[in-house]
Amino acid sequence: MLRPEQMSKVSVTGSRTVMSDVIETIHELNLVHLSNYDGSWDGFDPGNPISGADDASDKLVTVRSIESIIGVKAEDAGPQRIVTGEALEDELEDIRAQVNELDDRRNELGEELRSVEDRIGSMEPFAALGIDLDLLSGYDHIQVAVGEGNADEIERALADSEDVQEFELFTEGQTVAVFAYPADDAEDDALDDALVGVDFASLDIPEASGSPEEYVAELEHDKQKLESKLNGVENELNDVKLDAAGFLLAAEEKLAIEVQKAEAPLQFATTENAFVAEGWIPTEKYAELKSNLDSAVGEHVEVDELERASYEEKGGHHAPLEKAEETGVATDGGHVTKEENPPVIQDNPGAVKPFEVLVQTINRPKYFEFDPTVVLFLTFPLFFGFMIGDLGYGALYTLIGYVIYTKFDSEAIKSLGGIAIWAGAFTMLFGILYGEVFGLHILGEFVWGGNPPIHKGLQPVDGEFATGWLVLSLLAGIVHLTIGWGFDFVENLEHSFKDAMTESGSWIIMMFGLWVWIFSGAGGSAPGLLFGSESVFNGNPFPFGFTGFPAFNLFTIPGINFPFSVWLLVFFLGLVLLVVGEPIEAVEFLNVLVNVLSYTRLAAVLLAKAGMAFVVNLLFFGVYESHGGEEWHFMLSHGPDYVLHHHEGASIMFPGLLHSGVAGILVGLLILVLGHALVLTLGITSAGLQAVRLEYVEFFGKFYEGGGEAYKPFGYDRSYTTQD
């Protein structure tokens, strides 16, 4: 689980006469991730595509173009079929001609329709005015302008203009028609000059006559006819789609396979008479590859396992290759083009598999790296469930995850559904332990007899749990970070023990030295909840009897009178190791403090979400206090009057909309539903994102680099065609 599937570099060497058979066999197996020949061997050149590649590529482009035009989707496929070469010639050409003709008609009608719509849009202001179009132009002395603007400003501007002798305005809304008689000595554009600087956007006057309303009505009629014709063409295209979609999808698949096979030699090293193909294959599949090639072409090819990839870096760079000579693997006839990292197949069981999408969101792990997916599987739902901790919310998260997992075909989206199922399951588990359903403590009454084993610490009576969760969050951070630096330590051991100690062990030593010092009292400066008789582990809520670590003070620092502990000595030892290995990283030495403190967000989000759910329920059900305000109780079955009469010393925190009449109940129900929906949503955006942040920033940052190449075997998973 922590390592990808082991990969082997294989070589297939043979005569050019059987190259097509070899390609066909390897393609059917769908196992070999082909390597590109780099041109480094004397006498070998990259191969040329097999005859017919260009024709298949052209047809593939045609098929995809047709699918795009008529909107073919995967669900339109129908049953699998065999697509013959004759069908690719004749049927495809008929469909292409038919679709192109209909598409051209659709485009022409679309352009005509847009033109009519533009004309309607330009004519609507004139129709609003109600002035015949032939009255807006054709005058010898009168100047006319039509546009949109402020009629009062236009009128003032014309009145102040010396070039305009008389004028008249006709307005309808923002549309204004201006008729102006210029002065005798005015220019031909006197009206335009008068309107300069005025809020007026001029419109072109159409070259038409008669009523604009009639003209618009005629255009609307033309628009209806064009829309009808366009719908007819769309219906014809849809009919073509229904008839041809299955064939087109099958043809695309067949042609894609043909192109894939035809272009495979481009990755081979070839001479006039021979070829060499190299690639990666899961080690356990090597025997299957060799057996199938032997059956297909016999002695005409030689199949070799060149090297078996190990999980380590070598030579100070990422070259995780174990030479075949070192492992006893035969190499006769094999060639090694260059050092390269194998492609990665993450090897995780089914339950863990959905969490690979979270890892790949950052980057796919490299072959030599630890795959953190299993740790993510163990910690992310735990963090999430701890922060939300509610049976009701958890059930909804699980249901949402199940719907996503079962209703979507995309593997990435299905994985998100699987993650939601696990997160919801842990949320339900913690909800049972907290005794909560949608923020109500009714589960504690039925399952735990009124006293659940743990509490969130929101109420004053349970306040010690809040501090307890704070301390446990720190411990969770120490454990989580130790695993991350531990992975890095193991990876660096491949270089040397010194590298492992200086690059990874130094951080672990610093972290333990600093935090054991803090849990020993930090020279009297640490809070009492971490050590001594007041420690949360020495009584409620976790009576483990832990009172902290012994201080082991070595001496007192003169001047500041501060005790120097052996644990600080351990911390500085780790710092020295860090400086020896990577001096520049010494500036980040406080990460061992800051990174652990970052995990306190677990307790913070726990209390924040509990508080939000409490407020929603408080507004609807109401809450009363008892035992001097130490305990809070929701008024689920009785109102404030009953509580005050039957519970001595009780006080009402909020009476609740449930007990405020019909109007209050209706408003309260709306608040209850929307409030819990908000908490449910924020659970994803706060608890989910905070948990992811701890994984990505704090945990992954200690050891994970990513950047691995995905395993993409040469082959094709058929969906629409059967074998010819």
Image (cartoon, helix red, strand yellow):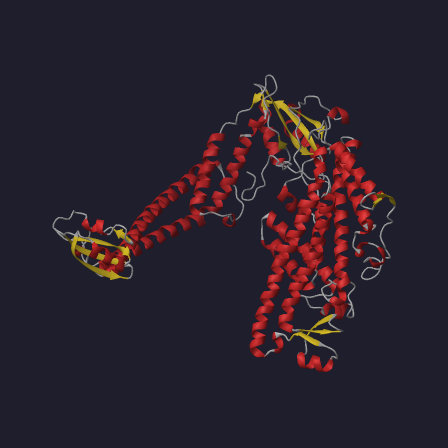
Q: Residue furthest top?
A: 43
Residue 216 visible? The answer is: no
Give coordinates of residue 321: x percent, y percent.
71, 29
Quadrant placement of the C terminus: top right
What residue lies at 64% left-to-right and 46% top-to-bottom?
Answer: 357
Q: Which of 397 and 634 lies nearest the eye of the viewer?
A: 634
Residue in front for this viewpoint, 393 or 587: 587
Q: How many marks?
A: 0
- Please provide percent x and percent y for residue 249: 50, 43
Above or below, 154 relative to 706: below
Expressed as whole percent of the image width and height from the top left, the position of residue 164 reads: 17, 53
| Residue 253 in the figure: left or right of residue 153 | right
Can you name the residue that lies furthest to the bottom here? 645
Horizontal side of residue 181 vs 528, given as left or right: left
Residue at x 38% of width, y 42% of height? 100
Rendering coords of residue 434 (x, y %)? 74, 63
> Does residue 319 sit above or below 370 in this rendering?
above
304 or 536, nearer to the observer: 536
Residue at 21% in and 55% down: 160
Is 470 rendered above or below residue 556?
Answer: below
Q: Quadrant of the N terminus?
A: top right
Quarter residue 178 falls in: bottom left
Q: Is residue 625 visible?
A: yes
The answer to which quarter of the image holds residue 47 is top right
